[in-house]
Image: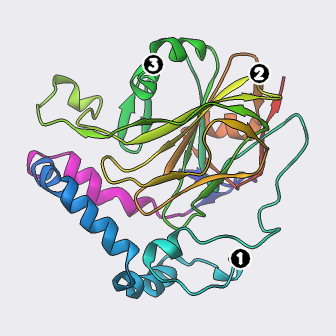
Amino acid sequence: MIKNRKGEVIVTNEKQNQLLEKLYGSAGGRLALKVLTRPFLSKMAGAFMDSPLSIPLIKPFIRKSGIDMSEYEKKRYWSYNSFFTRKIKPGMRPVDMSHDALISPCDSKLTVYRIDKKSIFRIKGSCYSLRDLLKNDFLARRYEGGWCMIFRLEVNDYHRYCYVDGGIKTENTRIKGQLHTVNPIALKRYNIYKRNSREYTLIHTYHFGDVVQMEVGAMLVGRIFNLHGSGGICKGVEKGMFEFGGSTIVLLIEKDRVQPDKDILRNSAENCETVVKYGEKIGTAI
C-alpha cells in the first residue's frame, strides 16, 4: 500500500514489475534471464534505448503513465533515454535548506527501517542483509542501531537525484549484479537468485554524521550515472541519474543522528510506502 503525506491511500504503477517477478520466480524464467542478461544483449538493449529508433516509445508511455510534461523543461528528445532522464523545470522541486532538515534525494515511495544485526531488507525484489548490500562488513557494523531508508522510484517518477546534505564524499564504489542458477533452500523465504547492480558513496555530512547514499539499478542492465568523484558537495545539488532500468536509492543513517518524520515511521510500521519528492523534508537532525 502507498500513502501520501496526508495519509491518503493512492494508486500507482505497482504492476510494473510483475513480469520480472514471474521471471525470477520460476526455473524457466531464470533460464530466460540467463540469456537475456548476457552482456551483448544488454548492450544491444542499451544502444536501442539510446538511439532515435526508440523515440516512438515516448508518447505512448507518457499517455499510459499520466505524466504531466508541463513540469519538465521543453526539449526535443533524440532517444527514449533522453526522455527518461528529462530535467524538471527550476522551482518545481524546492529543496528544504534548513540545516536540521534531512531531505529526500528523489521523487519516490519511501519506507524506513531500524537496522539491527538480523535486519533483512527487500530491495527491487531481492532480500539483503546490510553486509550483502554493501559487501563491506566494517561499514555495515557502523550502521547497526541506525536507519535504512529505501526510496523506490517507479517508471513515471523523476529519475534524477540529489545530495541530502553538504559535506565531503568518498569515491563511488560499484558492485556488479549477478544471477544465481542453483536452487537455494531459502528461496521460499528470500529471493537470492539475483543481486542488483549498485553504486554507493560514503558522505561525511555537515549535519547527519556519515551517510551512505546508494543507487540500485536493474540486476545486470541497470544504468546508473553519478556525476562526481570524491570531494566537496552541496545539499540539493544533483548527484546523478538513472537511465531506463534503475529505480531505487538507499540511505543508511548512523544511530542517534536523525529522527525520521512521524508520518513516515507510522506508515512504514504498517508496511505502507510514503510518497516523497526530491528536496522534501523527511527527518530532523538530533
| Among the two numbered marks 3 and 2 on one chain, the one whose residue lies closer to the N terminus | 3
Quarter of the image holding residue 102? top right
The Cα–Cα distance between marks 1 and 3, rounded to whole angstroms, is 40 Å
Horizontal arrangement in the rendering, residue 228 relative to residue 55 (left or right): right
Mark 2 belongs to which amino acid?
Arg
The overriding secondary structure of the stretch rendered in magenta is helix
**Residue placed most toward the observer, 22 or 227:** 227
| Among the two numbered marks 1 and 3 on one chain, the one whose residue lies closer to the N terminus | 1
- Residue 93: x and y, percent? 77, 62
Q: Is residue 20 magenta?
A: yes
278, above or below 265, in the image:
below
135, above or below 106, in the image:
above
Q: Is residue 24 magenta?
A: yes
The residue that label 1 is drawn on is: 71
Q: Residue 257, labelled with which disc?
A: 2
Q: Residue furthest right?
A: 98
In this rendering, the label closer to the viewer, 3 or 2:
3
**Residue interval drawn in magenta:** 11-28
**Is label 3 in a helix, a strand or a loop?**
loop
**Residue placed most toward the observer, 285 or 113:** 285
- Residue 52: x and y, percent? 39, 84
The residue that label 3 is drawn on is: 136
The Cα–Cα distance between marks 1 and 2, rounded to whole angstroms, is 34 Å
Q: Residue 272, labelled with which disc?
A: none
- Residue 34: x and y, percent? 14, 49
Marks 1 and 3 close (CB-CB < 8 Å): no
